[in-house]
Amino acid sequence: MTQQQRIVTLISLLRRTSQLMVDEITDRLAAAGFADLPPAYHPIFENIDPAGTRLTVLATRARLTHQSMGEVVAELERRGYVERVPDPSDGRARLVRLTPSGRQVVKTAVREIAAIEDKWLRRWRKAGLKGDLRTPIEAALQEEETHAAAQPAATIR
């Protein structure tokens, strides 16, 4: 009787790599004084526009429910990283905007993420990667988003 081998998919390899990168940025942010930012809060910082973003847009970009995004934003607001301000284009709506502390998190994260990505690129090149990795990934994601946007909305039966 032969023992079956575990199948390792590209999805699982990408997920494991992503998890290691997220763990490292979380550790680096904690070392920089932002120990109160677990990975669940990262999607806000990844998806917020410099002038602020509506909660519904943040939720869509982060692929979270409106309710979940509202809870995360409320917690980040309590911690002093974001604030809700009137939307100048629509007085009834509000924008979620980074506070000075939130902007410092982003500035620190961008610097640390660059170091993490550089480390992983060196590893991948040592393992045989040739050329650029970012450009084909961005192009493939753009193609998928364009394709998805062109599809009719699914109906619930």
Image (spheres, grey):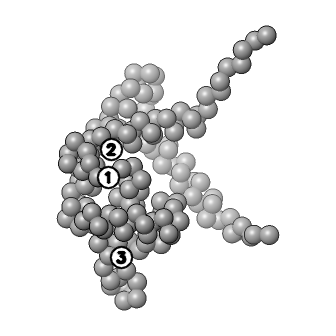
Vertically, is 116 above or below 43? above
Residue 89, how many percent across, how many down? 37, 85
Instruction: Tell me the residue that label 2 is attached to.
Output: 26
Front residue of 112/79: it is 79
| Mark with earlier residue (1, 3) | 1
Q: CA distance from mark 1 to mark 3?
A: 21 Å
Alpha-carbon span between mark 3 and mark 2: 26 Å
Residue 1 place in picture, x, y as percent: 79, 10
Q: Residues within 10 Å of mark 2 (few under 14, many from 20)?
A: many
The C terminus lies in quadrant: bottom right
Residue 141 position within the rendered picture, expressed as x and y whole percent measured from the top left: 53, 51
**CB contact under 8 Å: marks 1 and 2:** yes
- Please identify the quarter of the rendering in which residue 22 is found: top left
Under tag 1, what secondary structure? loop
Q: Nearer the viewer, residue 105 or 27?
A: 27
Query: Given the image, on which type of amino acid does mark 2 rest?
Result: Thr
Residue visible at 51% across and 37% down in the picture: 14
Between disc 1 and disc 3, the foreground one is 1
In the image, taking residue 77 as reference, residue 63 lies left or right, namely: right
The label number, if any, that marks residue 95 in the structure image = 3
Is residue 117 visible in this depiction of the protein?
A: yes
Task: Relative to 85, say whether 71 is above or below.
Answer: above
> In the figure, residue 78 lies in which quadrant?
bottom left
